[in-house]
Image: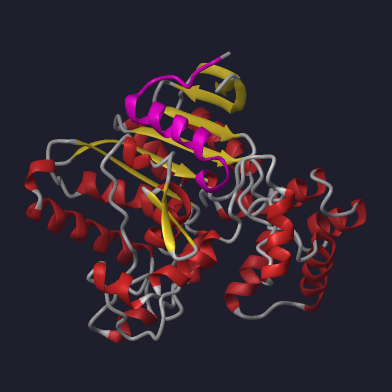
């Protein structure tokens, strides 16, 4: 929790522009081509957003975030009433596995007259133990850790234990040893949010060497987050955005002032998805299949288990979906209301590394259409 929708979502993933050096480039695969997009900085303290009461930053949690997000929507629709009857969808990734369903549930409970049609969440945190403990098998199956390390990472100290101990501020000697061994084998040259992507190299010389090797294939700017940070810290850009830095000295992609209640990570939200689906809200859960932080395997298990729990039969059996005459991922649909999909070759931030496939998925989701088959 605490990272910027504008910085990560709009500028690194699916907004209309991406920063490159001193300029902006048009994003050919912007989601703005399919819908009017609202990028919400949440909770206050993220990005350029701020609270007039500084003590707010010390005790933020899921309930506060959902309440404030609802208050924002009410204020926004009051200012722009012409959008009130439009179809409305909520999307997000990662910790938005909490933010998105909790906001959708609050909208329904508040009787706010919104035309809420569906939610889509990518590589989401839905259930602490299942999600985090799927990491060991993912790393092992992709050759990033050895058999012996896989054994201790599952048997001696698993990843949910390590995350829990990190949150409480006391890592045991045994767990510290395990995570050190895991990190050493993965190495600093692997981006755990996409195990196939190169890392952003700090030196200009190394950058130019790396880019010269990439010239023959479609290029992913692995340093786009650094470029976004540099761009949004420009005084002329801040002036043009009518934004100002309040209580911080620089813009950062993830907030350095916010103290989020990390115990909230353990609140399961998978059952909220079930309630939304049962109330007629379309639910799409998707996974970039190269993410080792919140891997597809845990997510797929959770969605499949949810479908059984709420009595939804499979309406589209597990199959490949296609974009540009290539396999773009796999999908399964339950009761024509709950969908799971993978995006082949995509990272934790799927539209960053697979923009075209992510846009195709987004387009099908908005239209309530099945993903194209072979």
Residue for point 57% across, 17% down: 317
Furthest-right residue in view?
148
Q: Position of residue 157 (x, y in %)?
A: 77, 63
Is residue 352 in view? yes
Is residue 254 in view? no
Residue for point 19% across, 54% down: 73
Residue 99 is left or right of residue 74, and the answer is: right
Instruction: Say which of 11 and 267 sits in front.
Output: 11
Which stretch did the figure color magenta? 351-373
Residue for point 38% across, 63% down: 62
Identify the image's colour scheme: rainbow, by chain, secondary structure or one colour: secondary structure
Furthest-top residue in view?
374
Residue 146 is left or right of residue 176, and the answer is: right
Instruction: Say which of 116 and 79 sits in front.
Output: 79
Residue 82 is left or right of residue 21, and the answer is: left
Residue 223 in magenta stretch: no
Residue for point 52% across, 33% down: 357
Q: Looking at the picture, does residue 233 appear above or below residue 293? A: below
Q: Tell me the chief SS of the magenta region.
A: helix
Q: Position of residue 199 (x, y in %)?
A: 69, 60
Q: Looking at the picture, does residue 152 appear above or below residue 166? A: above
Q: Position of residue 58 (x, y in %)?
A: 38, 82
């Amino acid at each position: 929790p605490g990272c910027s929708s504008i910085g990560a979502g709009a500028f690194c993933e699916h907004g209309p522009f991406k920063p490159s050096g001193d300029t902006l480039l048009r994003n050919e695969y912007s989601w703005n081509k399919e819908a009017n997009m609202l990028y919400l900085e949440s909770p206050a303290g993220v990005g350029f957003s701020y609270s007039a009461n500084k003590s707010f930053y010390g005790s933020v949690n899921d309930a506060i975030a959902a309440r404030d997000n609802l208050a924002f929507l009410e204020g926004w629709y009051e200012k722009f009433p012409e959008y009130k009857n439009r179809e409305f969808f909520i999307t997000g990734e990662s910790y938005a596995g909490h933010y998105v369903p909790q906001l959708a549930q609050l909208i329904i409970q508040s009787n706010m007259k919104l035309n809420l049609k569906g939610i889509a969440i990518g590589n989401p945190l839905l259930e602490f133990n299942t999600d985090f403990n799927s990491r060991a098998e993912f790393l092992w199956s992709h050759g990033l850790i050895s058999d012996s390390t896989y054994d201790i990472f599952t048997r001696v100290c698993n990843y949910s234990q390590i995350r829990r101990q990190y949150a409480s501020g006391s890592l045991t000697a045994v767990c510290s040893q395990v995570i050190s061994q895991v990190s050493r084998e993965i190495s600093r040259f692997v981006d755990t949010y996409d195990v196939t992507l190169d890392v952003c190299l700090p030196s200009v010389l190394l950058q130019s060497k790396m880019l010269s090797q990439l010239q023959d294939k479609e290029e992913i700017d692995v340093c786009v987050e650094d470029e976004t940070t540099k761009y949004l810290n420009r005084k002329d850009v801040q002036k043009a955005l009518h934004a100002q830095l309040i209580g911080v000295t620089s813009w950062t992609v993830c907030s350095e002032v916010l103290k989020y209640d990390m115990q909230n990570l353990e609140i399961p939200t998978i059952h909220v998805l079930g309630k939304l689906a049962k109330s007629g809200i379309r639910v799409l859960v998707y996974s970039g299949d190269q993410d080792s932080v919140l891997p597809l395997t845990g997510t797929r298990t959770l969605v499949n288990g949810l479908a059984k729990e709420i009595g939804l039969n499979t309406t589209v059996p597990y199959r490949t979906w296609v974009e540009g005459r290539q396999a773009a991922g796999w999908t399964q649909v339950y009761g024509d209301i709950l969908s799971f999909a993978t995006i082949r070759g995509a990272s934790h931030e799927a539209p960053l590394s697979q923009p075209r496939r992510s846009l195709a998925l987004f387009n099908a989701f908005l239209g309530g259409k099945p993903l194209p088959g072979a």
